Image (tube, rainbow, N blue to C red):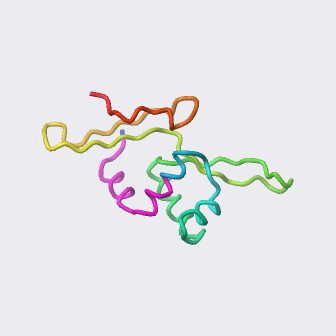
Amino acid sequence: MVDVDLALSILQNKVRRQILERLVREPHYPMQLAELIGVSQQAIMKHLKELERGDFVAKMKVPSEKGGPPRTIFRVCEAFSLRIDLGPDLFKIERRKLPSGGPLRLSSKLPE
């Protein structure tokens, strides 16, 4: 189970949410994210470390297309739902593995 306070503190940052918006569609290199979002690559790396700490993203090594050393790419590997209700189930968090075919095949509806 995810710690609610940790999840909220990580997700309160707009740049981190923008990173997740990109990574939920497809894996990216930090340099790609920096160009797409419009912040420095150093800032992207700092935010990716925080997202890793909260288990929102994972990194993996991929072979270089130009024959150099492997490059690090980041991806979202689990779906994450945080629902806030003013009632008995005030904070409900659910994690699930992404289905084959990628994150875009997820239902946008939370389970009952």
Where is residue 30? Give x, y as percent: 62, 60
Q: Nearer the viewer, residue 73 or 17?
A: 17
Q: Nearer the viewer, residue 82 or 107?
A: 107
The answer to whether 72 is drawn above or below residue 96 in the figure is: below
Identify which residue is drawn at 65% across, 51% down: 73
- Give the number of marks: 0
Segment colored magenta: 2-20
User: Would you say 41 lies left or right of 88 here?
Assistant: right
Where is residue 53? Give x, y as percent: 47, 53
User: Would you say 106 lies left or right of 59 here?
Assistant: left
Indicate the quadrant where residue 80 lies.
top left
Identify which residue is drawn at 63% across, 60% down: 32
Where is residue 15? Give x, y as percent: 45, 63
Say if the magenta span includes residue 26.
no
- Prevalent SS, magenta region: helix
Quadrant where the N terminus sits is top left
Question: Which residue is outermost to the right?
Answer: 67
The answer to whether 32 is drawn above or below residue 63 in the figure is: below
Quadrant where the C terminus sits is top left
Indicate the quadrant where residue 39 lies.
bottom right
Identify which residue is drawn at 23% across, 45% down: 84
Q: Nearer the viewer, residue 2 or 17?
A: 17
Where is residue 57? Give x, y as percent: 52, 48
Question: Which residue is outermost to the left?
Answer: 87
The answer to whether 63 is drawn above or below residue 109 in the figure is: below
